[in-house]
Each structure stands twice: as structure tokens, then as C-alpha cells.
Image (cartoon, helix red, strand yellow):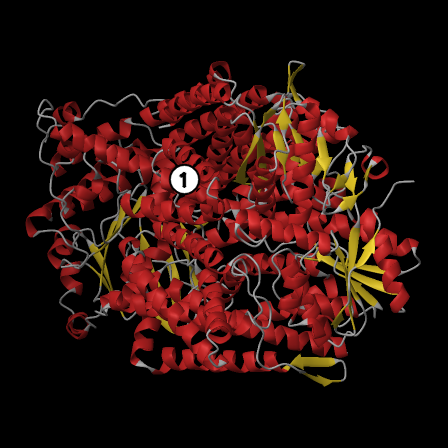
Amino acid sequence: MDNLIATGLIGISLGSQYALLALGFTLIFGILGVVNFAHGGFYVMGGYVAYYCSVVLGLPFPVAVLAATLATAALGWLFEMIILERVIEDHQATLMVTMGFYLVMATAILLLFGPESPEFSFPITGVWRAGGAYVPYANMVVIGVCLAAIVFVYWLIYRSGIGRAMRAMAEDRAVASALGMRTRALFPFAFALATGLAGLTGALVTPILALAPHVGDPVLAFSFLTVILGGLGSVAGATVAAFIVGMVEAYAAVYLGGSKGALALFVLVLLILVVRPQGLLGREVRRA
Amino acid sequence: MSASLAASAGALRADSISKAFGGLKVFHDVSFTLPPAGLLGVIGPNGAGKTTMINIMSGRLPLSSGQVLLGDTRIDGRPVYANADQGLVRSFQQTATFAGSSVEDNLIAALRFAKRDRSVLERLAPLLDRFGLIECWGRHAEVLPYGLQKMLGLTMALATQPKMLLLDEPAAGLEKSERANIDAYVGFAQREFGCGILLVEHDMDLIRRLCPQVIVLDGGRLIAAGPPGEVLSRKDVIDAYLGGADEEDADAQHS
Amino acid sequence: MSNQASIRRLPQARRPALLGGYEWATLGLVGFAFAVPVLTRNPQILSQTNLILIAATAALGVYIMLRMDLMSFAVPAFMAIGGYTVAVLSLKLGVTDVILLGVAAFVMPALCAVPLGWLILRLKGVYFVLVTFVLTEIVQLLLFEATPLTGGSNGLVGMPAVTLFGIELMDNSQVLLTTAGLAFAGFTITALFTRYFRYEFTAIEKNDVLAESLGLACWRYKALAFSVAAGVSGLAGFALVNMLLTAHPTSFAPMSSVSYITYTIVGGKGAILGTLAGAALLVTATDLFALKGELSPGLFGLLIIVVTLVARGGVIGLAAKAAGRLRRASPAAPARVAPIAAVPARGVKS
Amino acid sequence: MALRAQRAAIGALLASVTFCDAGSACELKIGAPAVLSGPAAQWGIALRGALEFVAKETVQERRLVIGGTPCTVSVKAIDSKYTAEGAASAMNALAADGITVIVGPVGSPEVTGMKPVALRNRMVAMVNSFARDSIGPRWPNVFHIGPGPSGWAGPIIDEGRKHYDFSSVGIVAPNDQGGTDVAGVNADIFKKKGVGVVEEYYQRGTTNFAPIVTRVLRSNPGAIDLASSPAGDAGIIIKQLRQAGFAGPIFRLGGPGFEEIARVAGGIEVLKDFLWYEPVAMDESLRALEKKHQDLMGAPRPENADFFRWVFAARMMVKAAQAAQSIDKPQAIADAMRKLPVEDENIGKGYWIGQQFFGINQEMSYPFAIGQVRGGKVQDYIHAAAVKEN
């Protein structure tokens, strides 16, 4: 019983991280039509910027997290404007440049910071316990900030003018263009928003896990899974799916073991796709 | 030549068909029959559900209720290609060709997919000649003028030697001077291939010229049927047109 | 209008060529690999040629699916099925004949692809991409889990050398000959297959709705292509396993699918020669960059970005464009008829 | 395109032939397929650093003299990417340069990929990896840099049992060859000592181990062994084990990387009770080696402690060349190697072993160390004698 609850708490913590990553990923896909292979790179970069600010420069941790968010957003903006924009119409070319950019980012980080993990711990330690269930305080903070960020993104998307435009783009690009929206102007903004979210996640999560140049690799696979499950471009779907993936990962790993747990997760996603090709909350596209 | 006509399997029949997207009824309880080698016009204001009707008849969209029969076979909800095999072929409102392929390759593709041989091209030669497609034989489809692309798409549909042709606004987007081509096309298809044709069209002159019978759709309902001269003077039909929503037919083609 | 006159105006049917120029050129180049062991015994040249051929053959799986604008991440999955089939046959059943093994390496993945294709080819565009990605992850995990058959994380080690008519093919140059044979088979199958069904594939790529309305059962051709792509990938898997004398899960890592896609697109997805050009360029570049140690992935990334930005249509596209410009620039060339200006489609009804 | 590549390659061949002729001025060329990119990069960087150090040392101290001529040593390290193909390709590139003396690579998949190439090109190699088949009679000229857990896990477990009381252990390792091979051997040794074992494998690439930790703690193990989990992973696992309330001792019967583990875990106090295999005991003699590296290379040694073992391996290779009086006859160098005593000026004396485990007596065994954190305090290394077979 305690295990059940403890596992559920782990699942929530995983889910909130995946949600932040997947929100950005799905926005980029929905609005730009781009599968961002560099997403994990921005996650790692967020971690290292936060590390540099807080450990090397000695800034307070919240300032470091903010700096990481802004730096990754800025780089995302520049990347979109300077490189991605040139090939935005060709989805295979966008795949190539985002992937190439990921390799460049990973190499730059390796050269700057070396291959080994630096010491980068969350400023709050300690664990809350109740029976067999437990949550480290640091994880609570991360969950809290993640939820706040998700709320912010929702506010941005569902309550602001720019959000309405982005949503229209994500749901139906052709219609939005036909309605005369200046779709192109949204691209760098949406990309920066998404990479900023990835950077924020990295800044928050790497100190409770580990920071190393390669920790971005699995981010891509999980963002993929989450977004497939939720329905491409669907903001709500990505959020729900992130928590499902987190829960399934936690319970499958605890009750089936690491390797079989991963297999179970992938098979589940495959089955869902076969039954509901549009993902859980993706709308059935009226075929035109 | 008209030997194929004799083997015609029978009429195309819509039997109180309805279609709803979510809660939105696009199409409600419509019935009509197109006899073999017949010609039936379909008119209605924008948003009346005309293109949706073609999508349903061809199998692209499933029905909400009712049925579509070709001869004795129920065909709604079957794959589009299976219905095309049965001789039920549709055209598209906007240009529909294979970009990047020459006119010749487009026609050969149509022949291949319908399992016809090249001799069909010879039968189509007068039409190809008239439209001016022979001059463009090696040119890529997407660089042709709009009207020519449209005629190419229509000719490809005919190259499959269908029993029933569903034409979705063939004259849309054509210059006035090009519209005579549609007359020639419809006449040729009926004369040479014995096709039954369901003609969805906005151009009233064209409908009057060609169709002995029309049905009128409005808001997804069949509001009138009969010879065009008679139907088009009815008050409810005129009202439907004048008050008809000016919005775009939502189920747009892809080009 | 007179029927007879019109028919006479109809251009004569061209005899459809079995293969196009690009296909012949590619097969020629792949065939040239057979001669490499005769020309040199330098192990690096042999090894580079070997790696390029394996990479190019694997990339064919991507190329075939791209004929229909479907991007496949499933290549490593089918390479693994092909490679492990060979390893199991030779280790457990003692089959070493290269022809038998080659047939098995093609047929087994192709058969596995049939039910899978049936499941996932209903998905369109980007969903297909994502599902093939998931599929590759699943196969990778299955390799670990199905230990009795696959040797789990240790892989299957210690395969005997393959034989051709009883002769062992063991040393560097013979390994290259085996790879060249498998690559040649893969390229020939792909060239013939994509040429023979080029109308169907082009139609599905450009306008599948129109193709279906003309009577083409698109899914059948997609499933067929998926199956053939799987078989060709299996040949590449065989070549890789044969080079390493080991079937090891890391050889079929899911992320390696990205490399095969990169070869195809950087080389130029429009022609089969592109996969060979892309594989040759990028495998060579990888090798050069490996000398730079830590920098190598970054340089590789930079190369991909630059080629993508500069050479739309890939290396082959760039070369074709350059050749075209050269021809136009040369005064001896006959003046070309001015092309008809494209008339923008007017998508609105009157 | 490919044609041009071929032509360029043939040109390269001609160039390399002439180069070989010129190379007869006595230069021992050591090749290293070394992982220089990706998560395992630090291992390859340690390997390359050790080789470059030994090369310079050999030249400066005239350690390699053939027929009266002092020889130089050059090092060529090529990124083998921690994959079988990467290593095979790197090895072929080395072979093409006429290099037949190999030190490296570091990881199991790489060793898998490089051995067939070494065999086909008749190279002599000194490899690392904890795989059950790293060396063997099939590969007569491949040597192994040091014993796997079969050699040293036993003494470390005994040391742990002196201080802690436990009757069961949970072993956590990644689900690939690098993980399962070591974990399996460790499990056998624990069982032989009467300790109950639960093995738990995680998917390589996992970043959050909380679920795995929950799972392994369900059986209430008295101790945990992280086997060959990479240092970064091991650090997170320890952090999360302690967060979950696990208070028992933690073993890492895998490889070096203690500093990184401690950093990731969040400090020595988090480790609390921790024992690990340290391939070499950090003592005066090794500090002297560190200093020598600083003096000779003008920079501190690579952080990864595998550096020391690779220095050992490279020096052995140089000694074998010296004994064989050859820089380019791998067979002669291998034969000489087999006759050499296992000994290093900084690391100490040992034995050739491996007959029992691998079926070939080509594994170097030398003194190692047991590292310990007890009650949150780092203890001095415990020196352990080189393991001997029989």
C-alpha cells in the first residue's frame, strides 16, 4: 500500500517534468510543424546555465533558474530566426537542422564543461515522510514550479491574444493563415517559449538528478512518447499524456522492473496509437 | 463502342442518406437516383453540402445513416479505390493532378490505377486534342494554366472508363470561354463511354444547357427536384439562393 | 474534330525504360565495390568502402519509404531482425552459405513487416514517423529481453565465417566482397522496385486522395514498400553482423535511424544515387571527424546544417543544379525554349 | 562522387605506403580506439591522456631502444564512439596507418567490434571491459588490462561484512552488456558467501531512478550493490536510495569514479556507508606519478582514475616492444608480452591470470584498493594484494 502511494508520488513528479518538456515540444510541432530534435539540448543547456550562475558565479538559485530560462529562450529565438526560418517549409530539412544543432550544442557543452558531472545540488535538502511514502522537499518545489509554469503556459495560450493566435495555428494552420494571421511572426516567439520551458525544466531537474552533457538524450524520446500519446499539437493532450507517461513509467518500473517497464510503456503507446491514431486528445482531423 | 454500356450494372441510388460532423448536421435524409448513363444536376447555395455529398457517394466519408447503392451493391463506407474499381469515379472541385509528373505520366497513372491499357488514350484523343493537352504532352502538370490542369484532372477521371462519374463543380474557376470544354467533356463521356454523370455545379447556364433533371440542396436537405427550367423558377429555390450563406464550402479540396 | 486526325496527333508511347540514368549510375558505382579488393589491400579503404556500402544499403530503407513521403525510423529494427536471423541460423543451425543467409536476411524482416505494416500504415504522415520510432525502441528492448534467442545484452558472438560454394569468406577483402554482394542485391531490388512502381509511389506522394479516387489501393503499395524496405534493411543488418562477426544490440541502436535518414536526405532524397552519395560523404566525414575526438559530433552537426541550408535537394540536387547551370552557361548549348510561366492556381470558385 | 572517393582513397594508399618506408626510423606507433564523445567520453580521454604521457616518458627517458637506436613513440587516438561499428572503423583506420600495436578501447561494445579487426590484421592489443568474453583463445594476441569483478569483488564484500551486518543485497545495473556481465558475476560471488541476491536492471538512459529504487527496496535488502552503473547514474541512485530512507551499506563493485559519484549524490555524507573498487590504491607512489604527469605534460592528469591502469598497460606494451626488439612485429611483441612479469614502477607487482575465467592466461592482475566511506567519513584506502588464480 505504501509502495502504491510512494510510486504514485514518483509518477506525479515525473509527470510534471515531462509535462513542461512536452508542452514546448508540442507547441513547436503544432505551430511551426517542426519536430524539434534539439529539445534535449536546451534542457541540458538550462541545467548548465543554472549551474554556472549559482555555483560558479554564486548567484541565488532562483535567479540562476530565471537566467537559464531566459538564456535558453534567447538561443531558441536566435536559432529559429537565423537557421530554422530558412527551411521552415520543408519538414525533412527542419529535422536535419534541429538534429545538427543538437549535436553542435552537446559538443559545445562538452568542450566548455568537460564530460563529468559537476557538483550541482538543489539548495533545499531533506525529505518529507509519512509512513512508507516520501517526497524530497526539492521535488515538491520542482513539482510546484512545474505546475505554476504549466498554469502560466495555459494562461498564455488560452487567455492572451498571442495565445489565441498560437492555438489557432496549432489546431489548423491553413485556416489560421486564411483568417489573415501573421503566422510567421509567431514562429520565433513560439520556439523561444518552448526552448525556454525546456531550459527551465533543465535548470530545475538536473540538480535533483544529475547534470552531465549527455543527460538530454532521453529527453527527446520521452517528449516524443508524450506528444504521440497526447496527440500532436494538442496542448491539453500533452499535459494529460505527460502525467500518464510518468505514472505508467513509475508503476511499470516498480512492478515490472526497469527494462520490462520501459517495454510496457512503449507497447502501451503503440497500442493506443493503433486504436486512436490521433492520440488521446488529438482531434480527428476532418480529412480534406 | 457502346458495348460497355450494355453491361452497366445499374443505377446509382442514394437512400435517405444523412451525415453529421459531431452535432452538426451537414446533410439530412436525402434520396435520389441516377439511372445508368443518365445525367443529374445537383445545385444549391454555398454550404449546402454538395461536396460532402460527393465525398459520401465516393466512399471518402462514412454515412451517419441511410445507404448508397450502385446497382444492388451497397457502396457507402467502402474504400474509395474499391468503388472506383466498380466504376464509380469522382472529380475534384479544384485542380487535382500529380505535380511533378508530365501530362502523359498523369494519364498513364490514371490508366494504370484503373487497370486500363493505353488504347483508352486513343479513344480519348479527340478530347485531349480539343483541350490542348496534346501540345503540353511532356510538360509538368503543375505548370499548366489553371483551366488546363482542371481539364487534365477531368480527363484522368474519364480515362478510368467509369460507369458513373461524380463531377464536383467542373466549371469552377474556368474562364467563360473555357466552359464550353465542360459541355464537350460531358457530351463525350456520355456518348463515347456511356457514363452516368452526377453534375454538381454553380453555373446555372451550364446546368440548364446540359441537365434534363436537377435536384436542389439547401442546408443539407433536398428541397426540389425536376427539370431545371421548372425547378429554377420555384420561389423556395430562388429564396434559398438569395438567402444562402456566403461562407466557403467547408469541406474544401486539396489541390 | 476528326478522331483519326486526333489519334495521329497523339505522341507515340515511349518504351518505358527498365531503369533510369541515376539507377544505372548507382548500380555501376556499387558494382565497382567488387573491384576495390583487387585494386588495394589497404585495410582502411576496404573498411571505409565496407562501411559506406552498409550505411547506403541501410539508408535504402529510408529512401523507399520516402518515395511516398513517409519518413521511417524503423530501419534499425529491421536491420536487427535481419542480422539476428543470420546470427541465429549460423550459430544454432550451422548455416554458413552466404546466399542462403542473404535470402533469409531479406525474407525474415520482410515477413515481419507485413503485419506491422498492416497495423501502422493506416497512420498518416507524422504519426507514421513517430510509430516507427516507437517500433525501433520496442525491438531494441526485445533484443535485451529475449535472451535465450538473442543472447540478451551480450549479443550473439563467435559466428563462423560465411561461405560461398564452400569457400570461407574471412579476411578483410572477402568481407568487403560479401558486403558488396549484399549491397548490390539491395540496390538492385530497390532500383527495380521503385522504378517499376514509380507511378504508384509518385501518385501516393503527391496526391493520395486523387490516386485512391482513380482506383489505387494506396495501403497495399505502402505495405508492399514497407515490406521491401524491411527486407533491404535486413540485408544491411546481415552485412553489419558479418563485418563484426557479432550480432550485438548496440549495433541497432534506435538513434542510428537518424543517421540513415541523414544519409538519405543530405545525399538527396530525389534519386537513389543520393543515398549512396550521402552515405559516402557522411561516413567519410565521420571518419575524418573521429580524429578530432570530442569535436567530432559537433563538426558532424555543423556539416548537416550547412548542407541542408546550402544544398536543398541534397548533394545530388545541388550537383544536378550545377550541371544544369553549366550547360546553360556554355554558349555551344542550344538555346532552350523559355519555360511557360507557372500560372498560380486560383483556388476560389467563381 | 563515390568514384572520386575511391580515387582519393587510392591516393591515400600510395601515400601511406611511402610513409611506412619513411617510418623505419624507429617509431613505435600505438593506436587507440578511444571513446571521445558522448556519455563515456571521460573514459576515452583518460586512455588517450595515459598514452600521450607514456609516449613522452618513453622518449624522454629512452625507455625504448632497439638495436642501439632510441625510438620515439607516437599515439593516434580515434573516436570509437562506444559502439562496435565505431571501434571497428577506428581500428581499420589505424590498420591503414600501419599501426599494429593497440592499447584500448575501454568498453564492452567497442571490444566486441574491435577484436575481429585486430584478428584480421594480426594486431596486438591490450583491451579493457568487464565483459565475460573480453579475451579468449579465439583472440590469441588480445590482452586484458586488469581483472574484472571475478578477481576483486570477493575481498571487497568480505571487507564490508566486517563492518556491516547484512544477509541480502540488491544489485542495480544497466540492462546492457556493461551492466549485466558485471552484475551477474557479483551476484554469484555474493551468493557463494551466503548473501541473498535480488538483481534489478534499468534501461540505459534512465535519468530518474526513483521507481527502480522503490522496486529494489521492496525486498528489504540489507545492502545495495551498484555494480558497473556509470558514475553519474550511481550518484543519482545513491541520492534517491537515501531519500527513500535506505540506511544500509552501498557497494559499487564496478569501476572507478568515486569523486563523480560523491558530487552527484550531493556529498560524502549522503554516501554514508559506501565501499567501492578502486583499481589502484592512491598512495605516495601514485602521487609521484601524478606529479610526473604534471611536470612532463604541463597539465594535471585526466580526472578519471582509469588513467593509472592505462599508464600501466601502455608501459607494458613499450616493455614488450623493447623485449621483442621490434616496433612493428605484433606477433613478436605479443610473445614477449606473455613472458614479461606483470609489474609497474608506480602500481606494483602482479600476475598473469585469466585461464579459469576466460580460458587464456592473458589478464593482468595487480594490487588494487578498497575505497570506503564509513559513517559519512572517507577512510584510507585498504590495499589489497593482486589476485592470483589457484
Front residue of B233 and D40: D40
Mark 1 — on which chain does it sit?
A: C
Residue A202 drawn at (x, y percent): 50, 69
Task: Report the number of numbered marks.
Answer: 1
Quarter containing the C terminus of chain A: bottom left
Tell me if B211 is positioned left or right of C334 in this view: right
What residue lies at 40% left-to-right and 51% top-to-bottom? A100
How many neighbours does mark 1 have within 10 angstroms: few (below 14), some (14-19), or many (20 or more)?
A: many
Residue C36 drawn at (x, y percent): 47, 18
Q: Quadrant of residue C171?
A: top right
Residue A59 lies, with reference to residue A263, above or below; the image says below
Front residue of C323 and D254: D254
Residue A123 lies, with reference to residue A225, above or below; the image says below
What residue lies at 29% left-to-right and 44% top-to-bottom? C312
Residue B93 drawn at (x, y percent): 24, 54
Residue type highlighted by circle 1: Thr
Front residue of C149 and C107: C149
What residue lies at 90% left-to-right and 60% top-to-bottom? D195
Tell me if D193 is positioned left or right of D143 in this view: right
Q: Quadrant of residue C270?
A: top left
Q: The residue tagged with tag 1: helix, strand or loop? A: helix
Asked if residue D116 shows in the view, the reply is yes
Quarter containing the N terminus of chain A: bottom right
Front residue of D17 and B48: D17
Asked if residue B223 shows in the view, the reply is no
Residue D220 drawn at (x, y percent): 83, 70
Residue identified by numbered label 1: C264
Tell me if D302 is positioned left or right of D277 in this view: left
